[in-house]
Amino acid sequence: TNDDFLLAFKSFFNMNDSNHLTIQRKKRIVIAFLSKLQSLRHLIVDPKNSIALYASSLLLMYEGVEDEPSISDESVVLKMIDFAHVRKQSGVDEGYLHGIDNIIRIFNEIITFIDTGK
């Protein structure tokens, strides 16, 4: 369910740590992922890229020192993986787009959680 995904991503970002600096750093990481997800979304909806991505995955990675104030582009990585079932098609892959939109929504919910505690 959507709640399960939200809990899984909160766990991924270790949202149980209440240290303000750590939470603010995590917010910057989530925002960096959102930027990369938006770029991927624009790529998927581009009519020149008419492909269907069946059973592919997204790999999300982040790293860095906890007290490091900035987030570099290299410390937040989003990769598309598992291309065994890619097919040419006419139009946008609505299923893949739906998945990306759901992750974007969940990441926005995480930012709201960081900002409001709800």
Image: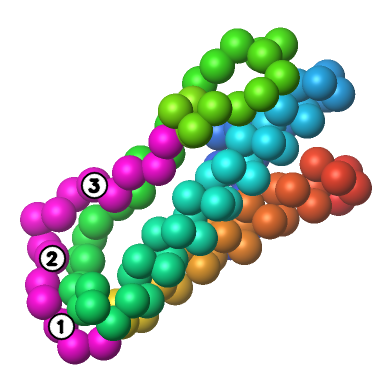
Farthest residue, direction right: 116
- Residue 17 seen in render: no
Helix, strand or loop status at disc 1: loop
For the residues bearing labels 2 and 3, Cβ distance under 8 angstroms: no
Helix, strand or loop status at disc 3: strand
Residue drawn at the location 13% of the way across and 65% of the way down: 86
Q: Nearer the viewer, residue 95 or 33?
A: 33
Q: Check disc 2: other Cα within 10 Å, few if <14, some if 14-19, many if 20+.
A: few
Residue type, mark 2 in image? Val
Magenta stretch encompasses residue 84: yes
Alpha carbon distance from label 2 to label 3 = 11 Å
User: Percent position (x, y) of residue 95?
Assistant: 35, 75
Residue type, mark 1 in image? Gln
Quarter of the image where one finds residue 47 = bottom left
Residue that label 1 marks: 89
Residue type, mark 3 in image? Ile
Quarter of the image where one finds residue 78 = top left
Q: Which residues are magenta?
A: 77-91
Q: Which mark is residue 86?
A: 2
